Image (spheres, rainbow, N blue to C red):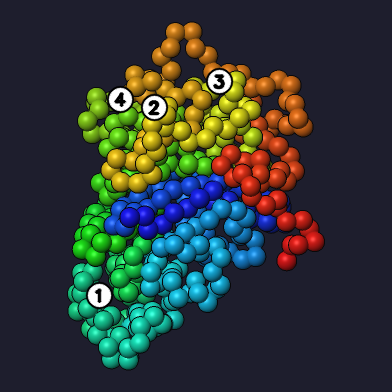
């Protein structure tokens, strides 16, 4: 049964330097008890998507300007702040990237955990403290009665992350969003934290959205993966299918840019050329086109929508049999995906448009040959694929 359904989510940051097109019509579902991986480079919109789900976008700049976020039949974008506060922690919880900045440095662990529990449950201080001791023991912190009196700086990075997991699971939420929960931890502690998170969520049937740029983490933790780039989902598939048969050039690039234990000794890595686009410019065409070795002329003008690999098949959004879908006009073949480069005889990536039309301009990324196409000014949100029937951006008179 579907627990969370996100449809055509559009998030913008209105700043003094202009609009940031952070999330551009993202849609996905999460079933009860399912673990979904969200991967991509830094700045691709992974964390912003989930902050929008939690209604925790920084104000006043961050805004949800279109789409729906339906959790158990309720559209979270339409709830009042008081109603949303009742859901956070109790029904939907989040583990943030850096536990040192997520925990209050001037309050003891006991004060913070007891406050979390009593905010959503009608229990006294003693019962809440007993629950906090139980939770710290559950996540493997020794002598939990004594450690409750400690402050966050008394804990190591791995221990602080365990405290954050304990607080997130304190009220047994139905959905847990883990935003790079192993950032800055060494590999041994990382493995312990991930194993703990996997075990505890499985025991309670908690659905998980795991945000990371580490493909090794999602390979062992998730059932399904969404690959994001420049605020779009460019490929989605069950985890084994995506690793065995990647079909979007960006996914192929990610997989070829990490070392493999089963690859030939000394095999060179194939980096992704160029840099991500500047999200202060409205996307025109495929945002990955300037860095793509498979680009065709159509990529400069039209951004493809997510479509099944096999045309006409019924689309299943969740589960181990979810439909493998990509947003690409010229997907690599299986042989090209394995090689990490085009193998078709005579194929040459489409050159940059030499005479931009419709007011478009061309701006450099790093080198003269690595270019990105953008549209100056504030384009209407309705121009974005997957964001049809959304409102126009608010004018200056409606800005706070």
Marker disc for residue 228: none
Tell me how far mark 1 sits from mark 2, CA to CA. Answer: 48 Å
Q: CA distance from mark 2 to mark 4?
A: 33 Å
Which numbered disc flags the more N-terminal residue, 3 or 2?
Answer: 3
Relative depth, front residue between 252 and 143: 252
Q: Disc 2 vs disc 4: which is toward the camera?
A: 2
Vertical placement of residue 283 versus 270, above or below: below
Q: Is residue 24 above or below residue 203?
A: above
Closer to the camera, 53 or 371?
53
Q: Residue at x 74, y 21 (%)?
A: 355
Res 296 label: 3
The disc placed on residue 310 is 2
Q: Which residue is found at the position 55% from the left and 62% from the top?
A: 77
Neighbour tally class for label 2: few under 14, some 14-19, many 20 plus, Cα within 10 Å: few
**Position of residue 156 in the picture relative to residue 92 (left or right):** left
The tag on residue 136 is 1
Q: CA distance from mark 1 to mark 3?
A: 55 Å
Which of labels 1 and 2 is toward the front?
A: 2
In the picture, the disc for residue 267 is: 4
Would you identify the image quadrant in which residue 313 lies? top left
Q: Residues within 10 Å of mark 1 (few under 14, many from 20)?
A: many
Nearer mark to the viewer, of 1 and 3: 3
- Residue 69 location (% of width, % of height): 49, 58
Q: Nearer the viewer, residue 24 or 17?
A: 24
Tell me whether circle 3 and circle 4 mark residues in contact (CB < 8 Å): no
> Judging from the image, what secondary structure is the residue with disc 3 in?
loop
Spot occupied by residue 398 in the image (x, y as percentages of width and height): 76, 62
Give the image location of residue 48, x and y in percent. 51, 55
């Amino acid at each position: 049964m579907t627990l969370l359904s996100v449809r055509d989510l559009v998030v913008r940051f209105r700043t003094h330097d202009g609009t940031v097109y952070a999330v551009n019509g993202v849609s996905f579902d999460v079933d009860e008890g399912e673990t979904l991986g969200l991967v991509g480079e830094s700045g691709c919109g992974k964390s912003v998507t989930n902050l929008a789900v939690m209604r925790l976008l920084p104000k006043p700049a961050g805004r949800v300007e279109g789409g729906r976020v339906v959790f158990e039949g309720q559209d979270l974008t339409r709830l009042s702040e008081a109603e949303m506060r009742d859901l956070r922690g109790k029904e939907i919880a989040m583990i943030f990237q850096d536990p040192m900045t997520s925990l209050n440095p001037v309050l003891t662990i006991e004060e913070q955990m007891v406050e979390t529990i009593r905010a959503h449950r009608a229990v006294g201080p003693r019962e809440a403290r007993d629950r906090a001791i139980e939770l710290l023991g559950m996540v493997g912190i020794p002598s939990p009665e004594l450690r409750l009196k400690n402050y966050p700086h008394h804990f190591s990075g791995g221990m602080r992350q365990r405290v954050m997991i304990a607080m997130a699971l304190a009220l047994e939420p139905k959905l847990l969003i883990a935003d790079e929960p192993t950032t800055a931890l060494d590999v041994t502690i990382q493995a312990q934290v991930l194993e703990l998170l996997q075990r505890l969520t499985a025991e309670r049937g908690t659905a998980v959205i795991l945000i990371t740029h580490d493909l090794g983490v999602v390979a062992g933790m998730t059932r399904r993966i969404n690959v994001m780039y420049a605020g779009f989902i460019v490929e989605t598939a069950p985890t084994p299918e995506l690793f065995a048969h990647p079909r979007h050039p960006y996914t192929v690039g990610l997989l070829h840019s990490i070392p493999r234990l089963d690859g030939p000794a000394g095999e060179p890595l194939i980096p992704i050329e160029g840099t991500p686009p500047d999200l202060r410019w409205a996307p025109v065409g495929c945002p990955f086109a300037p860095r793509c070795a498979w680009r065709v002329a159509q990529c400069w003008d039209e951004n493809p929508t997510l479509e099944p690999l096999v045309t006409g098949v019924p689309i299943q959004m969740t589960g181990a049999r979810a439909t493998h879908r990509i947003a690409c006009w010229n997907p690599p073949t299986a042989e090209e995906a394995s090689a990490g480069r085009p193998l078709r005889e005579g194929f040459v990536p489409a050159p940059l448009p030499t005479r931009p039309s419709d007011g478009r301009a061309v701006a450099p990324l790093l080198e003269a040959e690595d270019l990105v196409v953008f549209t100056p000014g504030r384009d209407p949100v309705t121009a974005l694929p997957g964001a049809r029937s959304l409102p126009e951006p608010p004018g200056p008179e409606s800005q706070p």
